[in-house]
Image (cartoon, rainbow, N blue to C red):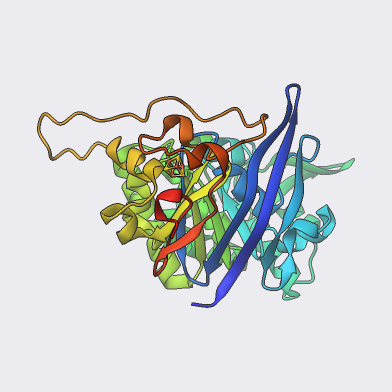
Amino acid sequence: MANLLRISGLTVGYRTSRGMVRALDDVDLELGSEEFLAVVGESGCGKTTLGLSIIGLLPPRSAKVTSGSIDYKGVDLAKLDPNEMRRYRGSEVAMIFQEPLTSLNPLVRVGDQIAEAIVLRRQRKGSDQRTVGEVMQRLYRTDKSGFSRWPRLRSKIPRDLRDQVIEWLNLVRIPDPGQVIERYPFELSGGMRQRVMIAMALSQEPALLVADEPTTALDVTTQAQVLRLMKEIKDKLGTSILLVTHDLAVASQVADRAIVMYAGRIAEDSNIYDLFSSPLHPYTQGLLSCMPTGTKEGSNLKPIPGSIPDLTLEAVGCRFQPRCPRAMDVCLQKDPTLMNVKEGHKAACFLYER
Ligand code: SF4
């Protein structure tokens, strides 16, 4: 599988009143074309920062990439300025967020929002010379002062665009898309809104889709439907997907491979089967023992004691050591690096040092 994305030594810090928080520390990872990679770990382990770094949406005032590179098709995304990054965001790398209600424009019909995304893509590809403003003036009412985003009573999406919008909504299995394009985001259920977000992201035909906890706000049935949809889309369109989730069960349902993050570092990197059948890192083993299985009657969940370390402090030794049931003397002195333990299975732990 050829690599689409290669991240090397990525370190990202956030300026806070207590000092610099190292949200990512020397992270290396590769993502192949058409691969479904899950990034899992507790809240605060750096997985969302990883997704935001790839798409160039880190908060500019507080966050900083201090070192490392994000090589996407030979271009280092970490070095691009905001204008250059706009050429990649959406068209090459798209992102869907946890809560679509805060990502969609509440004042614009969902059909118009997807249409706007399609116009932008056509412009980038040079297949439509009209500006977004020219097309959008047909979608929104204009007044004497010029452009206004107040919508018309009914959406006036041009015929060719309307067909495409409906096509994308069909792809994400929205029932009766002809009606749905006339709806505002608040008129749709959480699952439908998330499907609209996925349709909008996919309408850009990105090679890489970063999905940040896309199913966390959904009920279990809708979550399963959205996950199945993402898997189908990956198989059908050949889009690589990087799924950020705290839920190992979600990762197990869809991902080909998973990386487990802890305190801004990668603790384990493995194909999904080996990660669940023979986890190596004590942190992964701890996460799995916290997972409800629903099969063993009377068995208790075993939470990992303690909490993630203060990332403003310089780490000495293994970051997981205060919580690790298998800690050794060396773990207090040195920080383990990610090492190959088996074919395609890496762990950052001295238990596997030869
Ligand atoms: Fe535990 Fe040591 Fe491995 Fe860290 S390096 S996970 S403390 S055994």
Q: Where does residue 260 sit, x and y in percent of width and height?
A: 45, 48
Q: Residue furthest left?
A: 297
Left or right for 261, reference 11 = left
Q: Where does residue 96 sit, x and y in percent of width and height?
A: 55, 49
Identify which residue, 160 or 321, lies in the foreground.
Answer: 321
Identify which residue, 296 or 100, lies in the foreground.
Answer: 296
When the figure is inspected, residue 7 is found, relative to residue 180, above or below; the finding is: below
Circle count:
0
Q: Residue furthest right?
A: 145
Residue, x 43% and y 31% (percent of image)? 323
- The image quadrant where one finds ligand 1 is top left
Corner quadrant of residue 105? top right
Tell me the quarter of the image containing the C terminus: bottom left
Residue, x 68% and y 66% (percent of image)? 71
Residue, x 49% and y 65% (percent of image)? 167
Left or right for 293, reference 166 = left
Left or right for 311, reference 63 = left
Q: Residue furthest front?
A: 329
Residue, x 15% and y 31% (percent of image)? 299
Tell me if residue 204 can be seen: yes
Q: Where does residue 133 sit, x and y in percent of width and height?
A: 80, 55
Left or right for 235, reference 299 = right
When the figure is inspected, residue 41 is found, relative to residue 354, above or below; the finding is: above
Q: Where does residue 40 sit, x and y in percent of width and height?
A: 45, 46
Tell me if residue 155 can be seen: no
Identify which residue, 253 or 328, lies in the foreground.
Answer: 328
When the figure is inspected, residue 73 is found, relative to residue 39, above or below; the finding is: below
